[in-house]
Image: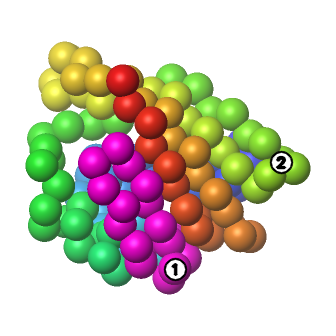
């Protein structure tokens, strides 16, 4: 598996397992997350939000498919947010990279 695809999978595992130090290690300091309800700027701000403020913490991410766009330094993940066995919603996350660090993430939900 390509390094960037593994980094995307590490992103979800880190959040689901509450391993916020590991999450911070894969993000560039200037990381930006654009999501439907807000934009979070900076890796430290994002990790703090995930640790302390995200509205649902009893969830897991089921990644169904990863797509890699080598010419754009992007990986897209299509999946579902689950609470137990219940699908809460589908998502597509588009990860932007510089080297192996995640510099940006845009989330689309349905």
Q: Residue furthest top?
A: 86
**Circle 1 residue:** 30
Q: Callout 2: helix, strand or loop?
A: helix
Q: Which residue is depicted at the point 25% across and 18% down?
A: 87
Label placed on residue 70: 2
Residue 60 lies in what quarter of the image?
A: top left
Q: Most prominent secondary structure in the magenta stretch? A: strand
Residue 78 - label: none
Residue 48, horizontal then vertical, whole percent:
23, 73
Front position in the image: 36 or 18? 36
In the image, which residues are magenta? 26-43
Q: Residue at x 67, y 63 (%)?
A: 97
Quadrant where the image shows the N terminus: top right
Does residue 42 belong to the magenta stretch? yes
Determine the residue positioned at 51% across, 23% down: 64
From the top left corner, tell me how far across and down residue 2 is, in percent.
Answer: 74, 48
């Amino acid at each position: 598996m390509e390094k960037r695809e593994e980094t995307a999978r590490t992103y979800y595992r880190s959040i689901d397992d509450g391993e916020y130090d590991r999450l911070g290690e894969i993000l560039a300091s200037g990381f930006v997350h654009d999501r439907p309800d807000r934009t979070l700027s900076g890796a430290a701000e994002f990790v703090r939000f995930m640790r302390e403020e995200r509205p649902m913490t009893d969830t897991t991410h089921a990644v169904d498919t990863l797509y890699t766009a080598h010419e754009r330094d992007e990986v897209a993940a299509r999946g579902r947010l689950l609470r137990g066995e219940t699908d809460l919603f589908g998502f597509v996350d588009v990860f932007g990279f510089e080297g192996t660090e995640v510099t940006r993430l845009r989330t689309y939900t349905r």
